[in-house]
């Protein structure tokens, strides 16, 4: 009966589908509507609206565990600021915001599970485009805008993917860091800190 914060949860349906105590789960996201619907559907303990700046407004160790699945790569800069942003500014600001978010995850719970797509997987998982993750941020943003009507997968170039070194640097207190594989290729990075 641990208290869990589902960070970047949308409607919480992933944890809500299998965790036996949904009334011990709190949702946290930047979009209120899906959280409200999820709380009604699954009976979650509650939800909190985040600002998107990488901070989580709760006291230290407010939760037993944080679940953060495929979220941290999007904690970069506000989407509204992407047009016209220089590549250097995106890299600097996204690094600061992601590092802050990682510190918040470590601060707010005694344990955590954080998963994110691996930068060097051949097919970028948000766009389904091979190699798009290696384009500059400005080129990736322009491509995402041009492909909206043409491509099967709708995506926004708001993400900054992790390689192993940067991921371990952001989660130095993880008790385990491992790589999930698909067809033998590294697909996702996972950091776990056990309580």
Image (tube, rainbow, N blue to C red):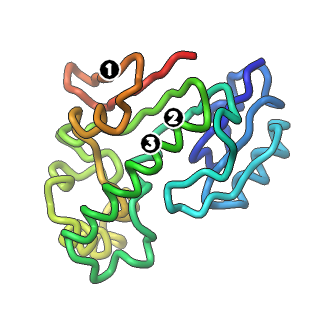
Q: Are marks 3 and 2 in contact (CB under 8 Å)?
A: yes
How packed mark 3 is, by other alpha carbons closer than 10 Å (few <14, some 14-19, many 20 or more), is many
Kindly identify which numbered label has been placed on residue 102: 3
> Which is in the foreground here, disc 3 or disc 1?
3
Left or right: 60 in relation to 147: right
Q: Earlier in the sequence, mark 2 or mark 1?
A: 2
The correct choice, above or below, for 12 with respect to 33 in the image is above
Q: Earlier in the sequence, mark 3 or mark 1?
A: 3
- Name the residue at 85% across, 45% down: 40
Which sits in the foreground, 20 or 168? 168
Kindly identify which numbered label has been placed on residue 195: none
Q: Secondary structure at mark 2?
A: helix
- Name the residue at 29% across, 47% down: 161
> Which is in the foreground here, disc 2 or disc 1?
2
Q: CA distance from mark 2 to mark 1?
A: 17 Å
Task: Check the image and name the residue furthest to the front.
Answer: 60
Percent x, y of residue 5: 66, 36
- Residue at numbered disc 1: 178
Percent x, y of residue 145: 32, 74
Q: Secondary structure at mark 1?
A: strand
- Name the residue at 67% across, 25% down: 64
Left or right: 53 in relation to 187: right
How packed mark 1 is, by other alpha carbons closer than 10 Å (few <14, some 14-19, many 20 or more), is some
Quadrant (top left, top right, bottom left, bottom right) of the C terminus:
top right
How packed mark 2 is, by other alpha carbons closer than 10 Å (few <14, some 14-19, many 20 or more), is many
- Residue at numbered disc 2: 106
Q: CA distance from mark 3 to mark 2?
A: 6 Å
> In the rendered image, which quarter is residue 6 located in?
top right
> In the rendered image, which quarter is residue 26 located in?
top right
Left or right: 16 in relation to 110: right
The correct choice, above or below, for 59 with respect to 132 in the image is above
């Amino acid at each position: 009966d641990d208290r869990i914060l589902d960070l970047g949860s949308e409607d919480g349906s992933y944890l809500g589908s299998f965790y036996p105590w949904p009334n011990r789960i709190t949702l946290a996201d930047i979009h209120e509507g899906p959280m409200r619907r999820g709380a009604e559907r699954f009976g979650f303990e509650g939800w909190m609206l985040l600002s998107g700046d990488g901070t989580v407004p709760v006291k230290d160790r407010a939760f037993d565990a944080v679940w953060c699945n495929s979220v941290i790569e999007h904690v970069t800069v506000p989407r509204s600021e992407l047009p016209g942003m220089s590549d250097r500014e995106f890299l600097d600001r996204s690094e600061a915001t992601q590092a802050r978010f990682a510190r918040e995850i470590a601060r707010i719970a005694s344990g955590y599970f954080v998963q994110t797509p691996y930068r060097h997987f051949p097919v970028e998982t948000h766009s389904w485009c091979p190699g798009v993750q290696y384009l500059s941020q400005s080129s990736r943003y322009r491509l995402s805008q041009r492909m909206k009507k043409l491509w099967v997968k709708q995506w926004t170039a708001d993400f900054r993917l992790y390689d192993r070194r940067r991921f371990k640097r952001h989660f130095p207190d993880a008790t385990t860091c491992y790589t999930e594989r698909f067809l033998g290729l590294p697909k996702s990075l996972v950091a776990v800190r056990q309580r």
